[in-house]
Image (cartoon, rainbow, N blue to C red):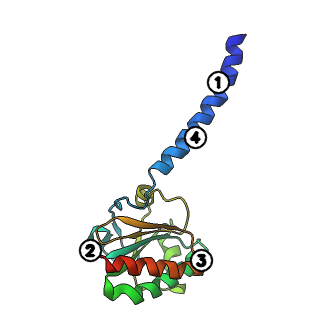
Amino acid sequence: MISTVLKNFLKPLAIASSLVLALNTSSAFAVSVGDKAPDFKIPRLESKGMISLKQYRGKVVYVDFWASWCGPCRQSLPALNSIRKEFRKKGFEVIAINLDEERDDAMEFLKEFPVAFPTARDTSGEVPEAYGLVGMPTAYLIDRKGYVQLVHEGFKKSDIEELKQKISTLLKQK
């Protein structure tokens, strides 16, 4: 009798403990400020060829994960286009990584919201997994040495000035 009561008590406790451990473990692998940004090499979305983070070493890079179904991406991609135009000659680049299952969905989105920066496509899910991506859009501002200096989740127009200030500061560092 005591054995059955104990089992009935411990089983939910064990399940709850496993859930807490799983949630903490997944967030423990998320890329944070100060971490080395995981490199990637994935196919370009809008043309042939590959894009790797390594090829932009020495620049300040904003890696932005987006999808056609992401509402805030309708504001963030055009804003990033403008920010890139302002800072590109000083050593800034944006890499947008699309996570749509269908390439046509992404291409339709870019017809409506065209960008001048490189776009890539990751259908395997390896890159968002390496970064510990939780929501969309999420972006990582990476310094010239390859370290994450900002993790930016979501997007509002009011984020633009703070982002530009952070980029400007990083561009001044050698």
Task: Tell me the kind of residue under disc 1.
Answer: Leu
State the SS at label 2: loop
N-term mark: 3 or 2: 2
Tags 1 and 2 in contact by the CB under 8 Å rule?
no
What label does residue 10 carry, if any? 1
User: Which image quadrant is residue 144 in?
Assistant: bottom left
Tags 1 and 4 in contact by the CB under 8 Å rule?
no
Which residue has dot 2 on it?
Answer: 58
N-term mark: 3 or 4: 4
State the SS at label 3: loop
Instruction: State the image coordinates of residue 119 (x, y, percent, origin top left).
Output: 41, 76
N-term mark: 1 or 4: 1
Taking the spot 61% from the left edge, 74% from the top edge, the residue there is 71
Q: Is residue 127 left or right of residue 144?
A: right
Q: Is residue 20 above or below residue 55?
A: above
The residues tagged by marks 3 and 2 sit, at their Cα atoms, a distance apart of: 28 Å
Q: Note whether residue 115 is visible.
A: no
Instruction: State the image coordinates of residue 40 (x, y, percent, origin top left).
Output: 33, 63
Instruction: State the image coordinates of residue 141 (x, y, percent, origin top left).
Output: 41, 70
The residues tagged by marks 3 and 4 sit, at their Cα atoms, a distance apart of: 31 Å
Instruction: State the image coordinates of residue 136 (x, y, percent, origin top left).
Output: 55, 66
Q: Residues within 10 Å of mark 3 (few under 14, many from 20)?
A: few
N-term mark: 1 or 2: 1
Which residue has dot 3 on it?
Answer: 156
Q: Name the residue nearer the viewer: 39 or 153.
A: 153
Q: Name the residue nearer the viewer: 27 or 162.
A: 162
Q: Note whether residue 114 is visible.
A: yes
Which residue has dot 4 on it?
Answer: 20
Taking the spot 53% from the left edge, 69% from the top edge, the residue there is 137
Task: Tell me the kind of residue under disc 3.
Answer: Lys
